[in-house]
Image (tube, rainbow, N blue to C red):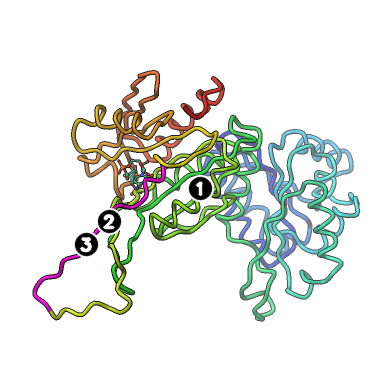
Amino acid sequence: MLANKTIVLGVTGSIAAYKAADIASKLAQAGAKVEVVMTESATKFITPLTLRSITSRPVVTDMFESTTEFSIEHVALAEAADVLVIAPATANIIAKVAAGIADDMLSCTVLATKAPIIVAPAMESNMFQNPITQENLVKLKARDFTIVEPGYGRLASGKVGLGRIAEVERIIGTIKQVLGRSKDLAGKRIVVTAGGTQEPIDPVRHLGNRSSGKMGYAIAEAARDRGAAVSLITAPVSLPEPVGIDVVPVKTAAGMKEAVDKVAAQADVLIMAAAVADYQPKTVAESKIKKETTSLTLELVRTPDILAEIKGNFLRVGFAAESEDIVANARQKLERKQLNLIVANDITDPTGGFGSDTNKVTLIDRDGKVESLPLITKREVADKILDKVVGLLNKGARVL
Ligand code: PMT
């Protein structure tokens, strides 16, 4: 989604300016055209040549521009920008922009652009927490700027505090989210479930499955990038928390049901990619079960079927993890759970299904249309599912 986008990256004079190189590099690798604008003080921390080499584009600084070039350049960049990102943003640039002052290339470009603007502050704790900086940030938020809040950590002074520039992944995730605002799922609320639920046996053991959460997370991220407001209800996984998504952690099938029932009530679409346990231990031992006997029998009872039982006026997309008669079995689940679309997942191939980065699925809708996809990445599968969802929403398809 970053490919062929023009991203103007404003770099200001903070020790975190070196992070701009990483941001520029990741954006350029994703196919974006990165136009860097540096304040003069930023050039004391990182050279324009570094950023020029990374982006393969000329870098605009305040140092050598004549007045004429200056005015042409800032208008051209302001108009070309799909998004303008100031990272790192010092207290000084934040104050200038909040006051509407335009006295250098970067502040002129900010004032001249109609593109969305993202600001990633980086400064000493006291400067960040100073009411003046906080008021300036409130002003920017009121004017629709997106602030990527700084984190807590080691600062230039050697002290530890709030003011450390946000992680690069977070800044890039925010860029994607902002760019997605004009896409085909803009204004839609989508709930996605992911991961494998864990049903406790005793305080240290549980029944689980091999779901890594990758499929559900890919759908949540793809929906975010296409403009949706996404809630991700996730069983325990070891994936990084995605940016710009409302993440609701759960553990058990019952916990997932409670969260889905609550969050999906306001949704347009529910996509259940989670591998929900079908059974749970009838009772949970209060203390660790001792290995005193040669065998142990656990009595299991059914968990709630979240998808089959849920009520509400939203599109339902289910998955069916199948190892035989894939399409026929998936069709039965589509009927039984009253779904608009089912994603039949062939789990016989180790490069698809549980744990892998790729997947091989067949999409089946209620009109009987069957689309078998080749082995592709989970992100590609996610976008194919969302293409179908967009088609169903456009057709006005709703709960059956
Ligand atoms: O997480 P990954 O490692 O990336 O793997 C992805 C995946 C293989 C887990 C995913 O692609 C997948 O197939 N998810 C569904 C697995 C599954 O539980 O299928 P099922 O056929 O048992 O369930 C059918 C549907 O009902 C699913 O949408 C499931 O979320 C839902 N369900 C199941 C049981 C239950 N008690 N409540 C439910 O809502």
Please, what is the three-letter code of the amino acid marked with disc 1?
A: Asp
Residue 385: which quarter of the image? top left
241 in magenta: no
Q: Which residue is mark 3?
A: 299
Query: Over which residues does the magenta segment extend?
Result: 293-307
> In the visual, does 8 lie left or right of 320?
right
Horizontally, residue 19 falls left or right of residue 379, namely right
Q: Look at mark 2 in the image and give the residue it sits on.
A: 301
Mark 3 is on which residue type? Glu
* Label 3, ligand 1: CB separation under 8 Å: no
Q: CA distance from mark 2 to mark 1?
A: 21 Å
Q: CA distance from mark 3 to mark 1?
A: 27 Å
The vertical placement of 154 against 149, above or below, is below
Q: Which mark is residue 368?
A: none
Q: Is residue 87 left or right of residue 360?
A: right
Q: Assess whether residue 303 is covered by the magenta stretch.
A: yes
The span from disc 2 to disc 3 (Cα, nearest Å) is 7 Å
- Mark 1 residue crowding within 10 angstroms, few (<14) / some (14–19) / many (20+): some
Query: Which labelled disc corresponds to residue 261?
Result: 1
Mark 2 CB lies closer than 8 A to ligand 1: no
Query: Which corner quadrant of the image does residue 33 belong to?
Result: top right
Mark 2: few/some/many CA within 10 Å (<14, 14-19, 20+) = few
Of the image marks 2 and 1, the number of the one nearer the N terminus: 1
Task: Write down which quadrant ligand 1 falls in.
Answer: top left
Local SS, label 2: strand
Residue beneath the point at 72% across and 44% down: 84
Residue 49: x percent and y percent?
64, 52
Residue depicted at x 25% and y 31%? 329
Q: Position of residue 218 (x, y in %)?
A: 44, 44
Q: Position of residue 14 (x, y in %)?
A: 72, 65
